[in-house]
Image: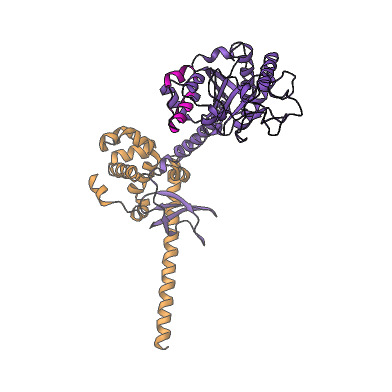
Chain colours: A purple, B orange
Amino acid sequence: MKKIKGLVMRTSPKVTGIFTEEGDFVEIPTPRGSAVVGQTIEVNLKPRRLFAPHNIIFKYASVAAVLFLVLSISVFYLFIPNMAVASVSLDINKGVEILINKDGKVIKVQDVNGGLSIVEGLSIKGLDVYQAVDLIIGNANQTGTFNATHNLILASVVPVNRWGTHIIDTQKLRDSIREEMTRGNMFGSVVVSQANHKIQQEAKQQGMTVNGYSIYARCEEQGISVQPDTLRDDAQKALADAKVSVASLYPEESFEVRAQDGKGHSTDIDTKREPNVKHGPEYEHPSNMESSPTEDHSSTNTPSTGETDHENETTHHTAPPVTQPAPTGEVGHENETTQHSM
Amino acid sequence: MNLEDEELSRYELDASLEQYQENENQEFFARVLENFVRVLCDYHITLDDLMKVSPKHSERKQTLIRAALALSRAPVLMTHLQTHRLLPIKELELLTGIKRKVLEKGRKYLIALALILSKPDFYPLKNFMKIPEQLEERV
């Protein structure tokens, strides 16, 4: 700051107008003491900023920028409900991708490899993701997508962005599917796992569903040879060919649902045993079963000398993997029950 | 009166003389400024106007000072200004080569400065103002 001389032209308690020796007419805050007209005073004039003449423009530009920012954020948040924050890749023989918004509602169902037939006639847009998945599974059962021997339901939760990280609870989805299958007297192996955007991209590149690619990756990890082409068309067959079960691939994320007796209570196919006969676990860990798609799972879940738990519908993979051969008569009985319930 | 008292007395005398001169100067400048403000009123220019239009950019200020110097040194143009209370923009543009737009924009500042530089009544203000030599030479 340089000091320059100024001639007081007019003064007030607040501001004083001066004529400087440099030829400027400027207003300054009235100096301490009294300044009288005609008095020569020395003042410090701040060096003017380069953009001083554009101060007003600068202010308006700042206000405009802030408004634009606020508007952009508002618009962004307004449109978020229509954005997919997560997706559920669901494979019931064929695959579909269910896009979910930030409220956990279905906004779109995309075909992945001809799986749209399982959602035909269903109006699931706007439904809760768990309801939607249940509805699709129920529809698949009614339309005969499920086979009589063994079924494989694969679901992968894929967050699309950071809002979708916790939008879908995989455990809740697992429980929901289990309940739906039990209610509909369906049976089969179910895998509900978590995937990510990278896996989804790689799956697309490989021409597989997310679930198919996930199986392929797990097989690779465990050194199991699986045919990618078969996996693309029929995951169940590919697993059977590779002689591997989903339970061994997904020990934490999979479970087995057995057919019921059709009486509405949550029992499994082998719940009609003699009460005084000691049975094994109601649901066997799928890893202990053969992975043949044509296998009769009811025959693998046989009475044993172990304790019986009639209330359990499913076998959690934390259950003891001990099974014993079933007596022929009981297997027949179970099969009969299964047929009745179907 | 001893030496110390004499020195003190001289100091007081100098101080009071300085104060007197300052007061005289201030009163003198006050009268000049009062007259200046009155003359500006004839041109419909107020001090407020001058505070507002006083150039902020040094480059623009130098351009206008140069124009004011040229105007003040051209008696014909000054006569035109004082007679018609109007700035001879066209002539000034030809004389200085400064764009009409610049001259029109700085019209009030230009008139005030031209009056300070040309009218003998305002010579004290002219003397107070330090015009860069290079500008004086260019005109």
Between residue A274 and residue B130, name the one nearer to us: A274
Q: Is residue B66 above or below residue A162?
A: below
x then y, percent, for residue A79: 56, 26
Residue lying at 61% horizontally and 25% vertically, measured from the top left: A300
> Would you say the magenta stretch is mainly helix, strand or loop?
helix
Residue lying at 29% horizontally and 38% vertically, measured from the top left: B76
* Magenta-highlighted residues: A212-234
Residue lying at 30% horizontally and 38% vertically, measured from the top left: B77
Q: Is residue B8 above or below residue B72?
A: below
x then y, percent, for residue A245: 53, 26
x then y, percent, for residue B15: 42, 73
Number of marks in the image? 0
Is residue A108 in view from this perspective? yes
Quadrant of image for the C terminus of chain A: top right
Question: Is A226 left, or right, of A179 in this rendering?
Answer: left
Between residue A204 and residue B95, name the one nearer to us: A204
Residue lying at 39% horizontally and 53% vertically, measured from the top left: A20
Quadrant of the rendered image containing residue A133? top right
Is residue A83 in view from this perspective? no
